[in-house]
Image (spheres, rainbow, N blue to C red):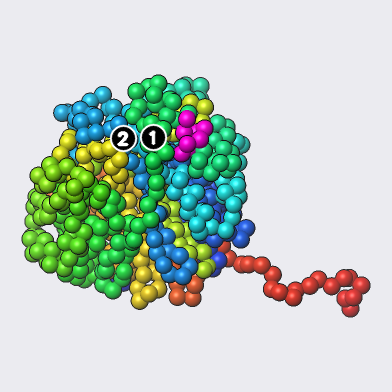
């Protein structure tokens, strides 16, 4: 990594950053592809608001970052409206009605923490597809809160799908990683394996069938999928290939408006989606425990502070596996997890000098709609979420903020294209546990539990930060570390999101390369089994809000992230150009 900037934090922490942040007074768009960020900035420049920019960015990402997100995926959007009200728009995937707790047979040879079924039926192909929510959620967000038309915001995506765009190295590497699976489907291979070889960096990528599907969306809105021609193509293909998704699933699908989940840390209010989104809940839980330690004094990346982070992450995962799921099926103990008493109890159990194994300290009770067997689940593996997702953070000068995490789940989702549509379905059923009787087991209509963490942070009623990232199970621990970098270590925004991360689910401790060997050695002496990995989680997209209304946007080195800020503005009223003859 070639450093381009170094910012010291309050406690002396200083790390080189590869990218530089952007500033803007009229708006900011941060996404994990430059063309998508440009599409959002185009909407702001055309007089649109942050919602117009966000929806344009998401539609464009479905074309230029097709391995991460698409119309047939799901996700959460955390919206802060211009008047200060907040709401969550949930467009998560749901189990089709034909899917039950015993639909898949668990693979006895699956690695720890993985939820593979025999024959990979829950991860690759038609059987892995959940009812998608993205298209409905994006269209509803625009209709409720945007200024521009659907045709306006979808136009950049249609343009790139029709004319093509240059593949980045990141996209090419993702294609190479999945080439064996992609080669099994002629539709997806035609786009990403031209001539039978994986795309190379710089290759032109066009998807005219996707452009046609987007034109149908412009004409018919979400009805193109939920009851229209795209839905017919999707479900007819399912019926021919043993999939579970049926027309009834699409007809019954609804998004949800949810109240934000709030937690507090050192005077900052942190908001995000509630369950079935697990990220903000367990971030709040971890920060409650950590608030009893002086992390600023301990310093960034020291054995003492890193050990504490690892232990609270393990605590969160133990509790998450036991009791976090779809609250329509499992009574998630939100109040208990966020209580000061529970934080004190878990804090007292941490040995500051020695790693330990953690069991769940709390359990869920099943609702009447769920299985009573969920009560018997105490720890076990958390969901095997893929790290392949995308995130956008968008804001305008009026205080409207959209912080949204969206996904197909695995790289290229179920790794096929619906014939004739250019669309890639999700493989969201891979996130459920194929074993029955657990908090995260399969059930008809059940929503996917996710580690997503699209966060909006305020202090004293004023916007301070908005951030989020892709990364599956690594999302919420990584977002938590970014908050600590900002709040405890006083880092600048770019440094806070690029700083090295660590992660564990209890099966070993992952460390990014920028951490020194001395830290790894010290953590091993405390009993942690360390493992060096190229990166923990994906590209974090963040905005910092200044008191004067200016915004700073930043994206990190872990993806093709790009921040674009809008400044300037229209001419002052009354400005005129005098004819030449009148000048003298």
Name the residue located 13 percent from the left edge and 63 percent from the top edge: 342
Name the residue located 35 percent from the left edge and 73 percent from the top edge: 459
Rendering coords of residue 414 (x, y %)? 37, 32
Q: Which residues are magenta?
A: 225-232
Residue 520 makes an appearance in the image: no
Rendering coords of residue 435 (x, y %)? 17, 35
Say which residue label 1 marks.
Answer: 248
Task: Please indicate whether residue 208 sits to the left or right of residue 468 in the image.
Answer: right
Rendering coords of residue 21 (x, y %)? 46, 60
Marks 2 and 1, the one that precedes in the sequence: 2
Rendering coords of residue 386 (x, y %)? 31, 40
User: Counting other residues with Cα less than 10 Å from the Cα at mark 2, is it few (<14), some (14-19), or many (20 or more)?
Assistant: some
Task: Please indicate whether residue 317 sits to the left or right of residue 229 in the image.
Answer: left
Say which residue label 2 marks.
Answer: 97
Q: Are marks 2 and 1 in contact (CB under 8 Å)?
A: yes
Q: Is residue 553 above or below residue 583?
A: above
Please identify the quadrant where the C terminus is shown.
Answer: bottom right
In this view, the residue in front, 426 or 40, is 426
Indicate whether residue 198 is drawn in magenta. no
């Amino acid at each position: 990594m070639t450093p381009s900037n170094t910012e010291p934090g309050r406690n002396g922490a200083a790390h080189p950053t590869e990218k530089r942040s952007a500033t803007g007074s009229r708006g900011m768009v941060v996404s994990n592809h430059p063309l998508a960020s440009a599409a959002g900035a185009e909407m702001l420049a055309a007089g649109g608001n942050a919602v117009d920019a966000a929806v344009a960015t998401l539609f464009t990402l479905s074309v230029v970052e097709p391995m991460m997100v698409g119309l047939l995926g799901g996700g959460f959007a955390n919206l802060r409206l211009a008047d200060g009200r907040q709401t969550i728009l949930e467009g998560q995937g749901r189990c089709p009605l034909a899917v039950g707790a015993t639909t898949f047979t668990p693979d006895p040879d699956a690695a720890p923490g993985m939820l593979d079924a025999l024959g990979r039926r829950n991860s690759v192909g038609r059987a892995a597809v959940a009812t998608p929510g993205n298209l409905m959620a994006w269209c509803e967000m625009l209709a409720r809160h945007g200024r521009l038309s659907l045709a306006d915001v979808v136009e950049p995506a249609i343009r790139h799908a029709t004319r093509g765009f240059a593949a980045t190295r990141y996209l090419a590497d993702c294609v190479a990683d999945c080439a064996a699976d992609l080669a099994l489907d002629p539709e997806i291979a035609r786009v990403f394996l031209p001539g039978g070889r994986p795309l190379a960096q710089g290759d032109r990528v066009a998807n005219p069938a996707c452009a046609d599907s987007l034109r149908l969306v412009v004409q018919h809105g979400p009805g193109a999928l939920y009851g229209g021609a795209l839905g017919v193509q999707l479900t007819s293909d399912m019926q021919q290939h043993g999939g579970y998704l049926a027309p009834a699933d699409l007809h019954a699908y609804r998004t949800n408006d949810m109240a934000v989940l709030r937690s507090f840390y050192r005077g900052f209010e942190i908001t995000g989606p509630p369950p079935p989104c697990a990220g903000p809940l367990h971030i709040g839980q971890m920060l409650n425990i950590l608030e009893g330690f002086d992390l600023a004094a301990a310093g960034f990346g020291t054995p003492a502070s890193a050990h504490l982070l690892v232990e609270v992450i393990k605590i969160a995962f133990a509790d998450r596996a036991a009791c976090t799921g779809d609250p329509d099926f499992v009574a998630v103990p939100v109040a208990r997890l966020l209580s000061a008493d529970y934080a004190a109890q878990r804090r007292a159990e941490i040995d500051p000098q020695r790693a330990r194994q953690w069991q769940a300290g709390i359990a869920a009770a099943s609702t009447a709609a769920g299985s009573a067997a969920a009560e018997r689940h105490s720890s076990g593996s958390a969901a095997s979420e893929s790290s392949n997702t995308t995130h956008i953070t968008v804001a305008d000068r009026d205080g409207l903020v959209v912080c949204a995490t969206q996904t197909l789940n695995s790289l290229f989702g179920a790794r096929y294209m619906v014939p004739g549509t250019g669309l890639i379905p999700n493989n969201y059923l891979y996130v459920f546990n194929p074993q029955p009787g657990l908090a995260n087991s399969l059930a008809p209509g059940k929503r996917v539990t996710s580690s997503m963490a699209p966060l909006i942070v305020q202090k004293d009623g004023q916007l301070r930060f908005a951030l989020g990232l892709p990364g599956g199970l690594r999302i919420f621990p990584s977002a938590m570390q970014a908050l600590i970098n900002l709040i405890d270590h006083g880092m600048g925004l770019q440094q806070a999101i690029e700083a090295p991360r660590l992660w564990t689910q209890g099966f070993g401790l992952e460390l990014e390369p920028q951490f020194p060997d001395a830290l790894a050695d010290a953590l091993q002496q405390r009993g942690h089994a360390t493992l060096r990995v190229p990166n923990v989680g994906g590209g974090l997209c963040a905005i910092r809000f200044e008191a004067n209304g200016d915004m700073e946007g930043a994206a990190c080195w872990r993806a093709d992230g790009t921040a674009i800020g809008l400044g300037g503005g229209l001419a002052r009223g009354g400005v005129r150009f005098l004819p030449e003859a009148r000048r003298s």
